[in-house]
Image (cartoon, rainbow, N blue to C red):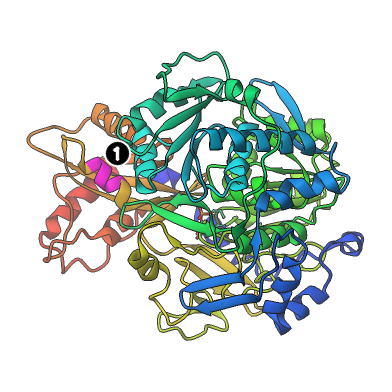
Amino acid sequence: MPKKTISKSKKENIGGLLHEKRKFKPSAQFSKQANAQKSIYAQAKKDPIKFWDSMAKEVIWNKKWTKTLQWKTPDAKWFVGGKLNITETCLDRHIAEGRRNKAAIIWEGEPGDKKTITYFELYRDVNKFANVLKSLGIKKGDRVAIYLPMIPELVIGMLACARIGAIHSVIFGGFSPDSLRDRINDSECKLLITSDGAYRRGQILPLKHDADIAIADCPSIENVVIVKRGDFLLRVKEGRDHWYHRLMQDAKAYCKPTYVDAEHPLFILYTSGTTGRPKGIMHTTGGYLVGVYTTTKYVFDIKDDDVYWCTADCGWITGHSYITYGPLANGATQIMYEGAPNWPENDRFWQIVEEYGVSIFYTAPTAIRAFMKWGREHPDKYDLSSLRLLGSVGEPINPEAWIWYNEVIGNKKCPIVDTWWQTETGHIMITPLPGITATKPGSATQSFPGTEAVILDENGKQVKEGGGLLAITKPWPGMLRGIWGDRKRFIETYWSKWDNIYFPGDGAKIDKDKYLWVLGRIDDELNISGHRIATTEVESTLVAHPDVAEAAIVGMPHEMKGQCMIAFVTLGGNIQPSEKHENLLREFVSRKIGAIAKPEKIIFTGDLPKTRSGKIMRRLLRDIAMGKVMGDTTTLADPDVLNKIKQRYEED
Ligand code: PRX
């Protein structure tokens, strides 16, 4: 097991200790043409509200707002009194402004099927599907669940909801039926959009079959719309289930947009919660649009002739903000790819970059580390000279990966934007601006104009240089407006650490040049391959297995995934641990939550170390998993337990 820990020198590099001094300056050529010019920082700093106010004028409103921000912690109202429909900025305006025949989405399926959808075609399909939703009884404010692979209908579904003021809740297609059920029930979705199946690494995921299992326990679901992705077997329940293509055939071509208040909810997106129950993060319309529009424009430097590609899935916030809303609000042409980066071969992404001349590429450190491992011979086979800007998101990028990305993919000529943000923040908050900011490998650098991230200590005192907790001191337009149905948890999780300051849950440091380095979660969430997973959620799943008496999860560094999960499990009765049991329990977690939550390793133990008050001592388990010398064990009820665990771990 300790083989999977990373070497000391690499560990030191995480957080950039060896790279703080190294700066990469933007080229004069890039700076000259960049959307963001230096003055943006000074302007936004002088009057952040005015900055956002002026950005809001670049999107389409039906009625102008009367007040830019009304703020009473923790409740923000942005663009008070304004009315809009977000699809007018994403679609109608492009039809009117000369982008009618421009490619909006260039889609490639995993098996190799391709489709280009122009802005007009997207507009048409969104309008039609909005009418379909209406015909199925969906009204403003109703919740619609979307459980689809990365196919254009996913974006169409989201925008069609927005067209009629319905609230979408996209659930990542890799989630299990149980996870889907819990999310549908939490926000009482009335309709589910799914597909017969999905391709993943050449295999077929039976989405509709999984959805059937889920909705057997979802009383709020009245209708299911099924997109036909392949010829996959499925059961159709008469009256409840409808084929997308049949409904679309008869749908009217135009749907008048429903104008909503700027603060009308646009979507709910579930993120893992520290108590084990996923949190339905709620975003509203006006501020979110202004936030994603502005950050896409300046961070990705989008121009009309760019080919932009964000490799995320719309099941996560990155797909919401930087596939569906941000790029379309900017009239961009983007690539949407359905499958895995290593299908059928490890060069799939680079083949796509060459084929379509991708110019802006946004991916996750975990993917970059995988590319590094697979070897540079894969990207080297292709002409990647169309690339002009690279982005990273989802977890801290280790400097080695940053440098590899810069040299092998970017050919040392593409600025890299390491963007820090969260499901909760809605849009990018800490990032370099290409053409302006000199970057340091591993640092997300500085706050985006109009936002303010600082480092505080536990007592709320600002750290001018050194480590502490990341904090956001000013409201920003895309900020979450709550957790669906749980006001108390919203306040407790984000707003109770300090007065009037947002606590994102990350540890970070600031160096002497005022560069920010986000180091990772400090709560009981783990970030595995860029996905947030609460250890408590996995623990309670393991304990739900009849053979398990107790379980504790700890995180440890992993070379590829950033972090991984080690489960310490005590079996009940006289059950003897075996490899079979380990596999069985790992599969159990995968089935109950989804493959992303599968523990890397299960360590069976006769007991778990506890304090005298009965609390599991995770810190000690973590030390064991990390192979560290144990700290003070005097508070253990039975110190011998720990030695037994350690022994067992070392035997493995
Ligand atoms: O810990 C931070 C990490 O990912 C968390 C947010 O995860 P999620 O809500 O799933 O959104 C991911 C996509 C925006 C953060 O609290 N994180 C995200 N981006 C970075 C990062 N950590 C370091 N550097 C980043 N660029």
* Residue at 47 percent of width and 80 percent of height: 500
> What's the residue type where badge 1 is placed?
Asp
Residue 350 in sight in this render: no
Quarter-wise, where is residue 369 in the image? Answer: top right
Front one among 266 and 541: 266
Pinpoint residue 164: horizontal percent, then vertical percent.
Answer: 59, 46
Front one among 528 and 5: 528
Magenta highlight on residue 540: yes
Pinpoint residue 613: horizontal percent, then vertical percent.
Answer: 12, 66
Magenta stretch: give its range.
Answer: 538-542
Magenta highlight on residue 304: no
Ligand 1 appears in which quadrant?
bottom right
Q: Quadrant of the N terminus?
A: top left
* Residue at 35 percent of width and 32 percent of height: 214
Q: Quadrant of the C terminus?
A: top left
Quarter-wise, where is residue 308 in the image? Answer: top right
Front one among 278 and 202: 278
Location of residue 213 with respect to 526 vertically, above or below: above
Q: In the rendered view, does 203 fall on the left or right side of 48? A: left
- Disc 1 marks which residue? 652
* Residue at 40 percent of width and 52 percent of height: 272
Main secondary structure of the magenta stretch: helix
